[in-house]
Image (cartoon, rainbow, N blue to C red):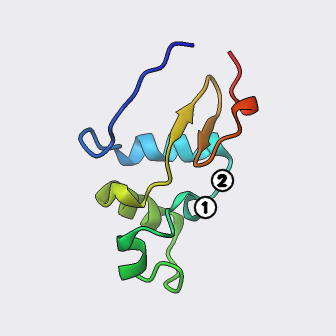
Amino acid sequence: MDVDTRDFFKDPFTEVELKKIIKMTGKKPIELLRKRDKTYKEMKLDQNKKTDSEIIKLMVKHPGLILRPIIILKDKALVGKVDPKEIKN
């Protein structure tokens, strides 16, 4: 399988790219946050309710908040711990 990699710390996602990826996962932006991340804890994101738009803006500003890895297939994106059976050629 051909794989393209991207270090989104060096080449950050735009808001538009993140929105597209989030839509491809079928999940809410809050579900794609790393709850163990230092920024997540400092900002108390588990207590402070944010809108989807606010969360996406935080993800752009603080890429460490984004759950990884992100695997983008043709029409869907898999984020976080991925079952290899979900990845098909």
Q: Position of residue 73 (x, y in %)?
A: 60, 26
Q: In which quarter of the image is residue 6?
A: top left
Q: How crowded is mark 1: few (under 14 residues within 10 Å), some or many (20 or more)?
A: few
Residue 31 marker? 1
The residue furthest right is 85
Q: Residue at x 41, y 67 (%)?
A: 37
Q: Which residue is drawn at 47% across and 78% down?
A: 45
Query: Is 27 positioned to the left or the right of 36 in the image?
Result: right
Q: How many labels does the image show?
A: 2
Q: Work out which quarter of the rendered image holds the C terminus and state it.
A: top right
Q: Residues within 10 Å of mark 2 (few under 14, many from 20)?
A: few
Q: Work out which quarter of the rendered image holds the N terminus and state it.
A: top right
Query: Is 60 positioned to the left or the right of 82 in the image?
Result: left
Q: Where is residue 21 in the image (x, y as percent from the top left)?
A: 53, 41
Query: Is 29 positioned to the left or the right of 12 in the image?
Result: right
The residue furthest left is 10
Q: Mark 2 points at which residue?
A: 27
Q: Which of 15 and 8 is in front in this view?
A: 8
Q: Which of 4 and 21 is in front in this view?
A: 4
Q: Is mark 2 on a helix, strand or loop?
A: loop
Determine whether 65 is above or below 21 in the image.
Answer: below
Real-space CA distance between mark 1 and mark 2, rounded to the nearest whole angstrom: 6 Å
Amino acid marked by disc 1: Glu
Q: Position of residue 13 (x, y in %)?
A: 35, 43
Q: Is mark 1 on a helix, strand or loop?
A: helix
Label 1–label 2 contact, CB within 8 A: yes
Q: Quadrant of residue 17?
A: top left
Amino acid marked by disc 2: Lys
